[in-house]
Image: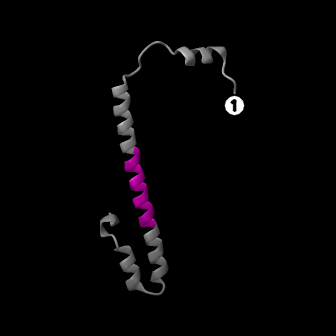
Amino acid sequence: MVDMTDFQKSFLARGTGQTLFTQKEFDEALAIAKAEIMAMAIEATRTAIKIERDECAKLAEETDKELAEKIRNRLPSQNN
């Protein structure tokens, strides 16, 4: 890690004396950011599950086409 200059240390210790945003604004922005992160995590999880299900169906298709279709259509709402 690189050492900070005296200016950087001073700036971090004192700041600029200006309020950049209020605590309420910070809390609201943080809540929005958390919601966006959760939405992306949910979508990524859904996509990963769909990919995994499709790959399992491909394996099953080699021996049992009916089983493969059951795997693919297990959760129809996620096929979009």
- Left or right: residue 5 versus residue 72 is right
Question: In which quadrant will I find the C terminus?
Answer: bottom left
User: Is 15 situated above or below 1?
Assistant: above
Occupied quadrant, residue 61? bottom left
In percent of width and height, residue 38 lies at: 39, 48
What residue is rendered at 43% in x and 86% in y?
64
State the scheme by which the image is colored: one colour
User: Is 31 situated above or below 74?
Assistant: above
What residue is rendered at 42% in x and 52% in y?
41
Which residue of the protein is positioned furthest toward the left in this rendering? 77
- Magenta-drawn stretch, dominant element (helix, strand or loop): helix
- Left or right: residue 1 versus residue 51 is right
Callout 1 amino acid: Met
Q: Look at the image and say whether residue 16 sits in the magenta stretch.
A: no
Which residue of the protein is positioned furthest toward the right in this rendering? 2
Name the residue that disc number 1 marks. 1
User: Is 36 situated above or below 21?
Assistant: below
Is residue 76 or residue 11 the one in the foreground?
A: 11
In percent of width and height, residue 33 lies at: 39, 39
- Left or right: residue 16 versus residue 29 is right
The magenta-colored residue range is 37-51
* Residues packed near mark 1 inside 10 Å, few (<14), some (14 to 19) or many (20 plus): few
In percent of width and height, residue 53 lies at: 43, 71
Q: Look at the image and say whether residue 45 sits in the magenta stretch.
A: yes
